[in-house]
Amino acid sequence: MTPDSAAETATALLAAAVRRLAHSQVLVIGDAMLDRYVYGAVDRISPEAPVPVLKVENELAVPGGAANVVRNLAALRVAVAFVSIIGDDEAGGDLTGLIGSQPGVEPWLLVQGRRITTLKTRFVAQGRAVQGHQIMRADREDSRPVHPKLMDRLLKIARDAIGATSVVILSDYRKGVLAGDVPGQIIAAARQAGRRIVADVHAPDYHRYAGADVVMAAARDLAVATGMPTDGDAVVAEAAAVLRLRHGFGAVLVTRGEDGMTLVDGAGTQHFPAESAEVFDIAGTGDTALATLGAGLAAGLDLRVAARLANIAAGVVVGKIGTSVVRESDLLAAISPNSGALRKIVSREVAARLAERWRHSQWRVGYTDGAFDPLKPGHVHLIEQAHGACDRLIVGVQGDAAVRAVKGPNRPHQTEAVRAARLASLPAVDLVIVDTAYAADEIIRMLRPHVVVKTSNEARDAAAAVMQEWNGAVILAEMLPEIAAD
């Protein structure tokens, strides 16, 4: 078998595993939250204090915490039973409505009087006065133990639901639902019913989850729990092995941020490198990974295959803005041979956000554009020049209608999708945007690059008029005859 055919076979097997996730049955028990996002523009600093002024433009509320695990499972078309406790407040009512609208979800949200539903409000800004996206987060929560009678009812519902599902997911954000010996009682009930337990523990007190089949642990929590370093492949595997043996876990899956994940089980250790090249937002990443892992085990996948899919799902979701979900189509796209290149093709809005992040990281951002119909060696020469003038290069490709308007009814020779994909396959290109209207000045203002590369004096002068607004530079590239003719 050739390397190419082996890779194709591996991809096909992984795609088949993704398709098996749908229609499995999972029980989720844990701390439900509401994530609220307040979006707006920041163009100035307050005269009252050195803080940005957010001009609110939009608000969005989505399930968070264990409720976000449920939301991700629903996105994967998994049948979910969800048991949790909320307060008798507005956030609890909003969360009940959001969970009830998820397809395939049977919610058991018990209400405790005078309890505060955990609410995390994130203020997200775009503008010249700030760098980055999230400028503040405000939390409202009640972490007191749940009333004993209500907890007895929760445990009864959980025991009844265990028999109707294949895997039990415990999502512990330390907000009271899984306090004390509750995890131990659920684990005992699941074991008696022959069900597997997957737990995500946001704290170092792992002893309360003794006997779980798989425990997800953040590297920082693992370090606290074991007193061991976790800043490298070998040492994190050693710490996970100690934790696994200490508490009788079947496996430990360590989430390590930009270093990916590490799985330690009875068969040994496997490291999964991070799947995302760019990180937009880490909110909810662990929830997505937990949901995918649980869905994989419920579908009968091998643990290592399920863990790999969980790592891929985490890589997909960090490339999105806000608390997001991963669907079957996202996973299939991510495992395709061309996924790395195709992920470079983004909207103007996403490109602008990434450009802002790159500037904040002190990277020099460059931009060039054209029809690239078709992509020729001269175009590649242009792009290499642009790449040499910056640290991160964004390339704009004219949409089909724009090319037709400029070059006539018989153009383009290749569709915008093909042209964008070919540009994205070039190592020198970091992002590609398809501009259907070809509003060059508008795009440059959105991206605010340090340098723009053009191929004619006329185009250079037009770009310079815009770039002078922030003292950007415009470079006239060496132009080969084939580009001039095209």
Image: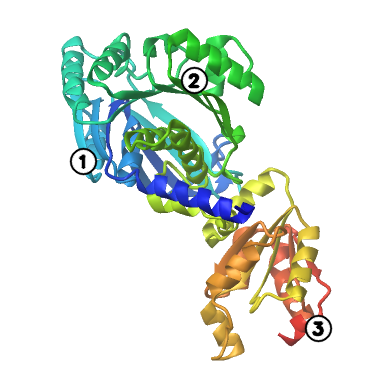
What whole-number distance in Å separates the C-alpha atoms at marks 1 and 3?
Answer: 62 Å
Q: How is the image coloured?
A: rainbow
Percent of width and height locating residue 440: 62, 72
Labels 1 and 3: the sequence-earlier one: 1
Residue located farthest toward the bottom when viewing the structure as drawn: 409
Circle 2 residue: 266
Q: Amino acid at mark 2?
A: Gly
Residue on which the image places disc 3: 481
Secondary structure state at the residue bearing disc 2: loop
Marks 2 and 1, Cα distance to the nearest angstrom? 39 Å
Q: Residues within 10 Å of mark 3 (few under 14, many from 20)?
A: few
Q: CA distance from mark 2 to mark 3?
A: 63 Å
Inspect the image, locate mark 1, and give the three-letter code of the amino acid beneath it. Gly
**Mark 2 residue crowding within 10 angstroms, few (<14) / some (14–19) / many (20+):** few
Quadrant housing residue 131: top right
277 is higher (above) or lower (below) than 479: above
Please state which of residues 92 and 82 is positioned toward the viewer in this rendering: 82
Q: Give residue 403's position: percent from left, percent from top.
A: 58, 82
Q: Position of residue 92 (x, y in %)?
A: 24, 32
Q: Secondary structure at mark 3?
A: helix
Residue indicated by mark 1:
100
Q: Is residue 92 above or below residue 231?
A: below
Residue sitting at 65 percent across and 22 percent down?
A: 234
Residue at x 69% of width, y 43% of height: 361
